[in-house]
Amino acid sequence: MSVYKDKAHGTWYTSFRYIDWTGKKRQKMKRGFKTKREALNYENEFKNSVAVEPDMQMDKFVDIYFSDKKNELKANSIRNKQHMINKHIIPYFGNKKLNEITPADIIQWQKIIQENKFSKTYERMIQNQINALFNHAQRIYNLKENPCKKVKRMGKSDADKLDFWIKEEYDRFISGVDRKSEDYLMFEILFWTGIREGELLSLTIADFDMTNNLLHINKTYHRIDGKDVISTPKTDNSVRTIIIPNFLKEEVQEYISYHYGFPENERLFPIVARTLQKRMKRYEKKTGVKPIRVHDLRHSHVAYLINQGVEPLIIKERLGHKNIQITLNTYGHLYPSRQKEVAALLDEKNKGKD
């Protein structure tokens, strides 16, 4: 028997041996369970989590993958990953053993996915999910190799093509929005700060420092299972402070004056992302500008800054990117080539040399 009564505390504990994925024998003890059943369940779940074998079926491994990731990923990220894996990976690979899935199997699976005519970016997102599963199995559970590494990835990343508005297009769009409406201020903040959609929808009056023209980004909003969820931003670097221009500060103050007495710590824009997207589509249709996504206003902000000569490091800090490479990979192609300037400089420095 591996479950015992702790008479001194009136609780149950479990003490058992197990073999980890490296083949080593180990001892495990866990105290504080209210019932014997809870202690037994813990033991069984723990043994299942460490007993992953390379010949485990994909569908069973997926459960372990999400168990391992539950404290690492945010609820919204887990939900999105589960949706893609359950819809596009489990139906094809669910009953196959991890160590029996070959590069040829991956190619055949890719063909099936591509028959659906998804966008290239969505294809890449699906590809990234299966890569993540095999990488986790290889890194943590001793799978010999990742079959995806021998196959060309399907789809394309966002960096291959960015949709955005130039300032003239944005001016046309915003001219169709009532200046006193919440829609006007939401789109103004998105275009002139480049913050993410979830960051916008989590904003409160308290996030604005009107004296110093500062906007503090320290949380994000999601709608999960019909409930409003406020959590920490996407990454640690996403927690940042943005300096906003005077005209935008004045627009925020003007909007707040229309809503006198609005609580400082309640969401300034109490809507869901889908509502924001629908409103944007309505104004696009009204003004005749080319349709883009709400997220593309972030790209539009960057494109405008680049056109004004702002350096990548400043843009990286403003967007909350983890490192400068992300900024350069995503937006580097928008910077004009300076090769002619370099050649002219070299000519100037080498004048008089024969």
Image (tube, rainbow, N blue to C red):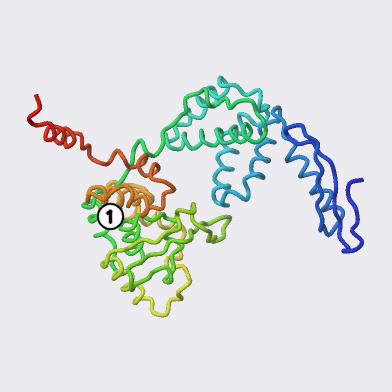
Picture quadrant of residue 59: top right
Q: Position of residue 153 (x, y in %)?
A: 47, 28
Left or right: where 63 falls relative to 7: left
For the N terminus, the quadrant is top right
Q: Nearer the viewer, residue 80 or 320?
A: 320
Q: Is residue 349 above or below residue 147?
A: below
Label 1 SS: helix
Q: Position of residue 287 (x, y in %)?
A: 25, 54
Q: Residue at x 31, y 56 (%)?
A: 191
Q: Which residue is mark 1?
A: 286
Q: Residue at x 46, y 29 (%)?
A: 154
**Which residue appears farthest toward the left when viewing the image?**
352
Q: Is residue 76 above or below residue 146?
A: below
Q: Position of residue 41 (x, y in %)?
A: 81, 48
Instruction: Estimate how packed mark 1 is, as few (under 14), some (14 to 19) or many (20 or more) residues with alpha carbons within 10 Å.
Output: few
**Which residue appears farthest toward the front when viewing the image?**
353
For the C terminus, the quadrant is top left
Q: Nearer the viewer, residue 332 or 198?
A: 332
Q: Nearer the viewer, residue 50 or 286?
A: 50
